Image: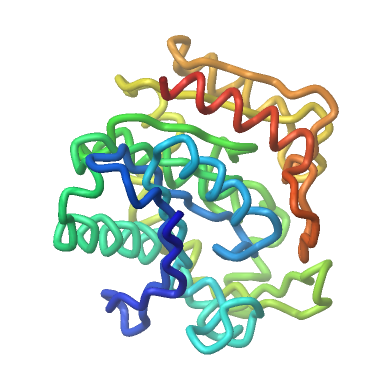
Amino acid sequence: MNIRKDIKVEGKHGRPVLLDTYYLNKKENQPIIILLHGFKGFKDWGHWHLMAESFAQNNYYFVKFNFSHNGTTPENPLEFGDLEAFGRNNYSKEEADLDVVLDWLAQNNTGRYNMNDITLVGHSRGGGLAIVKAARDSRIKRLITLASVQQLGFASRHPEVLDTWKKEGVHYIINGRTQQKMPLYYQLHEDVIQNKEKFDVEKAARSFSKPWLIIHGTEDPAVSVNSAYQMKEWYPQAQLEIIEGANHVFGGSHPYEKEELPAHTGQLLDICIEFLK
């Protein structure tokens, strides 16, 4: 297997996009899978590398990347070393980062992978972005959402903070793992308001027309499993798979030092491979 880590690609908003690729050397024209991480996530979180290797072993060209403003830095992609960037992140920047990755793939294709066979995999908040992007971008052929939110916009999930957030210009959240006070500047909400139609997950789901696999765990404390049932209602043609007992990260943790996938992620992988085939 060929693994290329921390490829630095020039971004569109003054910060680079860092990406990893996983693929088998002997295979040509492999279908592409692109992973979009979630809120307070990053490409090297937990067991994502093991999942990437597993997809690659099944003959997929797997790409995972850091959103340019996710709070990590190219020098240290494993820690939130730039909280100012984190606070300045928004969905428009994240979509631009995904476009950077798609453009990089198109410009660097030597026949190893198939640009006409791209699947987006979005986890948590990354799932919401994956839905709205896949709905309107013809380059995306399939969608897989993992523990996905059913709406984008921090204020839509926490309306009680909106007045103070607007007045003070910043709202802080505590990272449970690192105990860092992470800023969210009000521009995040403004970006959602200014692009209300573009980032409307329900609208995108109701107009969807591609294969879509929805996976969620019954014991998800971060995003209720009801989110998955809601999206299935919006797009009845979607394949819905509920993993009994699975949490928000399907048994993973950070750091993840085991050599085998968590059991619930193993189930997830089997479901994904069957769907893709």
Q: Nearer the viewer, residue 139 or 222?
A: 139
Quarter of the rendering containing residue 167: bottom right
The correct choice, above or below, for 161 with respect to 229 in the image is: below
Determine the residue positioned at 48% across, 18% down.
Answer: 234
Quarter of the rendering containing residue 217: top right
* Image coloring type: rainbow
The correct choice, above or below, for 68 with respect to 21 in the image is: below
The location of residue 158, given as percent across then percent down, is 69, 52
Quarter of the rendering containing residue 40: bottom right
Residue furthest top in the image: 236
Determine the residue positioned at 51% across, 19% down.
Answer: 274
Q: In the image, 226: left or right of 219?
A: left
Determine the residue positioned at 59% across, 23% down.
Answer: 271
Q: Nearer the viewer, residue 214 or 254?
A: 254
Q: Can you say which quadrant of the picture contains the C terminus?
A: top left
Q: In the image, 235: left or right of 261?
A: left
Determine the residue positioned at 68% across, 70% down.
Answer: 164
Q: In the image, 164: left or right of 126?
A: right
Q: Nearer the viewer, residue 268 or 206?
A: 268
The location of residue 72, given as percent across then percent down, is 56, 79
The location of residue 80, given as percent across then percent down, is 64, 80
Q: How many marks?
A: 0
Q: Nearer the viewer, residue 248 or 173?
A: 248
Residue furthest front in the image: 26
The correct choice, above or below, for 149 with respect to 208 in the image is: below
The location of residue 233, given as percent across then percent down, is 54, 14
